[in-house]
Image (cartoon, helix red, strand yellow):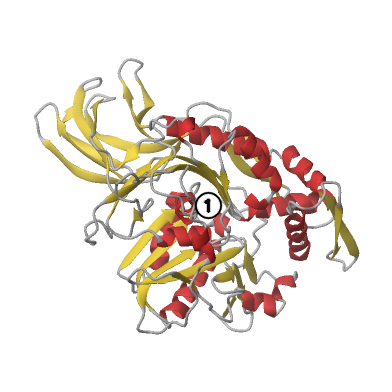
């Protein structure tokens, strides 16, 4: 078994910084806490940065934004909101919290009632962090993290947020992969990562290449905003392989709502009640307390009446099971393993299970995973810093070896059945960038057809879960229908036909590739006259 180096997290350097320092900044935007870590050049230890007055502790900023009613574009950030007790003001919608889960979402549920949009709240927080850190040090590279389940939309948002930042290199890594690096496992290890955050559960199987005389890996690196980091470093190209991954937009904040609704079903869920529910959840996650011990938290409802939240560890576990949490984790596990097996993974290859994120502290979660993972050892690095520290390990000169999360399909004409169908181009688990292209021949669907439209979609796997909100309460719903395809974007690329095509006639051969930015590229040839079809970019697919 490979030796674990989790102690690296506990030896974080905290010296004074100055404007002569150059290095990399990592920001892990969380639903509850955002972590900020800086690492100077020349391999010095990482530093949790004190950004008083917005940080609660070095490197930790509460993910809270408050907009003043008196001054336009005047915001209080993080710990400032808590110190001024603005977090308990239930009368106005000036407060934005738990905004991360809604970034990139097409629909925002009424439980998010802030007048600050989720995207705006996240932008304010990142820009304020940048402003404070860049006044202390010189940032040469910015590394950001993103959840798996909303990666594409989240990435688009981050690109826009970072456009105005004066930094040469910006990198993006998915949170489970960063967690794998943050756990400090040796090169050559294969591990299952469960990242149970405030608003998402992400699971992945990551192979850390290297060991036995081979070059060490630098986990998955996602490059965006037009920056190709490959070739900008003198390092030899190394790879980290994500063999399989899946995600669900459900997290610790939803458990808080389940608790408050379960214990005070007749009461409106207020910010103060949710915070007490969170405190109760955290105390009941202590492995040293008896499962029958009842813990009580005093709260006040919106009428200022005194109420109590009372729950035992056993009661919490029963509630989570009733809500379907374990079934959801089982589905994520099966989906992740299924995809990984397409990439030659076998369960016996698994060296460790890594748990990060606040929700991973709940004993029920670890015990359940222990059962389904048999005797595989567990690692529990400090959940707050692990992802940000893993992200810091990402540097230029890394060859991306990731896998598609959901696959991609093309809407095209089926000559045999004479109707349009969705044809799979790349399945979930397809490594990218592609090592060889995929060729497909398309026929005309009508007489005198002037062009063929390329419409791209992603399959929604049967049996997976989605979150719906019923009366403001997060509820798990299983996707039962088969062959559901979701259009990736509204952009349609049309390939002109000259001369026009006739129904059923093979007209064009297209060649598809996935590039190093996980963008689908297509080129081809007109089979009737050998005219070249120039290369076009169909956008990111991930």
Camera-side residue: 112 or 290?
A: 290
Camera-side residue: 373 or 341?
A: 373
Quadrant of the drawing holding the C terminus:
top left
- At 35% from the left and 84% from the top, the residue drawn is 20
Label 1 sits on residue: 105
- At 18% from the left and 35% from the top, the residue drawn is 524
Q: Position of residue 285 (x, y in %)?
A: 73, 52
Judged from this view, the residue extending furthest toward the right is 306
Judge from the rendering whether residue 21 lies leftward or rightward of residue 229; answer left or right. Answer: right
Q: Quadrant of residue 226?
A: bottom left
How many numbered circles are shown? 1
Q: Quadrant of residue 425?
A: top left
Q: Residues within 10 Å of mark 1 (few under 14, many from 20)?
A: some
Q: Does the image show residue 265?
A: no
Q: Does the image show residue 453?
A: yes
Judged from this view, the residue extending furthest toward the top is 416
Location of residue 158 with respect to 360 vertically, above or below: below
Judge from the rendering whether residue 20 lies leftward or rightward of residue 466; answer left or right. Answer: left
């Amino acid at each position: 078994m490979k030796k674990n180096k989790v102690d690296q997290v506990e030896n974080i350097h905290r010296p004074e910084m100055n404007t002569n320092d150059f290095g990399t900044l990592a920001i892990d935007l969380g639903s509850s806490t955002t972590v900020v870590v800086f690492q100077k050049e020349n391999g010095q230890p990482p530093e949790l940065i004190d950004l008083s007055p917005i940080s609660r502790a070095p490197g930790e900023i509460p993910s809270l934004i408050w907009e003043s009613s008196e001054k336009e574009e005047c915001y209080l950030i993080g710990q400032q909101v808590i110190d001024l007790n603005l977090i308990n003001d239930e009368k106005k919608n000036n407060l934005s919290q738990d905004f991360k889960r809604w970034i990139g979402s097409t629909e925002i549920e009424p439980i998010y009632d802030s007048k600050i949009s989720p995207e705006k709240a996240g932008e304010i927080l990142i820009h304020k962090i940048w402003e404070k850190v860049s006044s202390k040090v010189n940032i040469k590279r910015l590394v950001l993290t993103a959840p798996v389940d909303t990666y594409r939309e989240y990435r688009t948002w981050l690109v826009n947020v970072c456009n105005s930042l004066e930094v040469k290199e910006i990198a993006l890594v998915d949170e489970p992969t960063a967690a794998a690096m943050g756990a400090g496992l040796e090169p050559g290890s294969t591990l299952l990562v469960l990242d149970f955050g405030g608003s998402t559960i992400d699971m992945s199987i990551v192979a850390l290449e290297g060991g036995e005389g081979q070059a060490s890996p630098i986990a998955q690196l996602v490059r965006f905003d037009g920056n190709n980091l490959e070739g900008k470093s003198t390092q030899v190209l190394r790879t980290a392989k994500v063999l399989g991954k899946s995600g669900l937009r459900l997290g610790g904040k939803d458990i808080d709502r389940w608790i408050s609704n379960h214990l005070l079903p007749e009461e409106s869920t207020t910010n103060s009640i949710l915070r007490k529910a969170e405190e109760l959840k955290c105390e009941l996650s202590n492995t040293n307390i008896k499962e029958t011990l009842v813990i009580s938290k005093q709260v006040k409802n919106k009428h200022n009446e005194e109420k109590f939240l009372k729950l035992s560890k056993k009661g919490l576990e029963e509630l989570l099971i009733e809500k379907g949490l374990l079934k959801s984790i089982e589905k994520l596990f099966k989906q992740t393993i299924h995809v990984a097996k397409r990439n030659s993974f076998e369960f016996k290859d698994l060296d460790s299970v890594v748990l990060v994120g606040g929700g991973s502290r709940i004993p029920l979660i670890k015990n359940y995973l222990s059962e389904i993972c048999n005797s595989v050892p567990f690692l529990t690095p400090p959940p707050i810093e692990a992802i940000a520290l893993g992200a810091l390990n990402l540097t230029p000169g890394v060859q991306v070896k990731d896998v598609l999360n959901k696959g991609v399909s093309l809407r095209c004409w089926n000559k045999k059945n004479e109707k349009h169908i969705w044809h799979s181009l790349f399945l979930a688990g397809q490594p990218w960038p592609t090592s060889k292209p995929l060729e497909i021949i398309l026929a005309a669907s009508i007489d005198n057809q002037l062009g063929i439209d390329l419409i791209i979609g992603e399959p929604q796997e049967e049996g997976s879960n989605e979150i719906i909100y019923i009366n403001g309460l997060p509820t798990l719903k299983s996707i039962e229908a088969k062959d559901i395809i979701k259009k990736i974007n509204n952009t349609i690329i049309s390939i002109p036909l000259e001369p026009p095509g006739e129904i059923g006639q093979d007209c064009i051969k297209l060649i598809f590739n996935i590039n190093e930015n996980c963008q689908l590229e297509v080129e081809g040839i007109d089979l009737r006259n050998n005219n070249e079809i120039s290369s076009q970019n169909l956008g990111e697919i991930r």
